[in-house]
Amino acid sequence: MKQLNVRAQKLSRLGSAIFAEVSGWKREARDKGLSVISLDIGSPDRAPQEELRGVLASASLRADAYRYPGTEGTLAFRETVAKWFDRRFGVQLDPQSEILSLMGTQDGLAHLPLAIADPGDAALLPDPGYPVYGAGLAVAGVEAIPLPLLEENGYLPDFEAVPQAVWDKVKFMILNYPSNPLSAIADLAFFERAVHTARKHGVLLVHDNAYSEMAFDGFRPPSVLEVPGAFDVAMEFHSLSKSYHLAGTRLGFAVGNREALSSLRDLKNNIDFGVFLGTQEAGIAALELDMNAPKPISGLYERRRDVFVRALREQGWNVPSPQATMFLWARVPEGWSSRSFSQSLLTETGVASIPGNAFGERGEGFVRLALVEEEEILAEAARRIGEFVRGAEPGK
């Protein structure tokens, strides 16, 4: 008799289940009576501005807000995105053909391989990089080829080191600056090289720019679309989750190359009917506030970065100071693996982090810590980490 089998083999290619594992480690820590400080998931701990909550609340009470919203996003949302993009990057977008609303950037990044590639195709992914990149390829049956990001190169890829045989094979490559998990940044000159490389090898350049509004020390992350001719070979993803603390509402957008956006739109037309109208109205309000009465969220995370980095260094862990994002990417003390350090730190002190190898092979030897607690809690986390690092025996 044939056995029931309801699990696809492709799920084994989705990568690390570390986020579920960390949840288990948290339960273990709480069972021991520890208070857990969750620096593992990059989920904003503060609510959106009151004005945005008011827009969302009002929209939810309107009877006409509950119809199917349409995959591409309302024209009002797309026109506001175009206006904001011009103000922020000096780049003009056609709301009709160069902007697509998303249920967060993860929605778009996960579905993109299904829309633009076929089983057996290949793509270059940053290593270390955000896990959804590989998950999207696994579901689509697309081969993932690591694009090494090395500390000695400022975590920027060396395009010249990629063999021509690889370029001949890949259909697209994904870049992400400011980077999750690395917190690395890239300037416009880098994107000029990236666009030149994509054009030279005939590949689509996909840029995840979710942290464009979360950079420090006066740095303003560019858009790849600022490069002349980028629309021919590039598309870019943006998120309202982190910049405006709208993570739970699920809202983002993709912009750039018309053909790639059309393919993604055609796919999503068959699997969803778009973002709740109230959420889009809150997004419009967020972008308009940013243009007319800006309160950059980057200042909050820059202050948290300063407090946490200083406190960790005072405790004897000489971690780097990130220039962007809500993450700290730190090398684990000598003798520890990423996983053993992260697990032991949580179960012994209650401080949750993510081991670096969850983001790719080249993440081994590091951990990611998220700046998603208030400053006094981050200082307490640093105190616990310091005691742990000074007193614990290294594990494998």
Image (cartoon, helix red, strand yellow):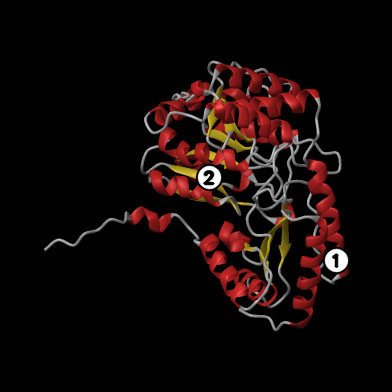
**Callout 2 crowding tier (Cα within 10 Å): few <14, some 14–19, many ≥20:** many
- Mark with earlier residue (2, 1): 2
Badge 2 element: strand
Vertical order, 376 against 81 (above or below): below
Taking the view exactly as shown, the residue that stands out farthest to the left is 1
Name the quarter where the C terminus is drawn: bottom right
At mark 1, the secondary structure is helix
Question: If the image is split into quadrants, where does the N terminus sit?
Answer: bottom left
Please name whichever residue, 134 or 50, is drawn nearer the observer in this view of the structure: 50
Task: Give percent across and percent down for residue 391.
Answer: 76, 82
Residue shown at the point (72%, 23%) measured from the top left: 288
Q: Residue 24 occupies which quadrant of the picture?
A: bottom right
- Disc 1 marks a residue whose amino acid type is Arg
Q: Please tell me in which quadrant of the rendered image residue 332 appears.
A: bottom right
Residue drawn at x 69%, y 53% as measured from the top left: 182
287 and 260: which is toward the camera: 287
Quarter where residue 380 is shown: bottom right
Residue displayed at 47% across by 29% down: 274
In the rendered image, residue 71, in percent from the top left (x then y), is placed at 46, 26
The answer to whether 114 is drawn above or below residue 372 in the figure is: above
Residue 4 in the image, given as x and y percentages of width and height: 21, 59
Q: Nearer the viewer, mark 2 or mark 1?
A: 1
- Residue annotated with mark 1: 313
Q: Is residue 352 above or below residue 117?
A: below
Residue beneath the point at 28% across and 55% down: 6
What residue would you read off at disc 2? 124
Residue type beneath disc 2: Leu
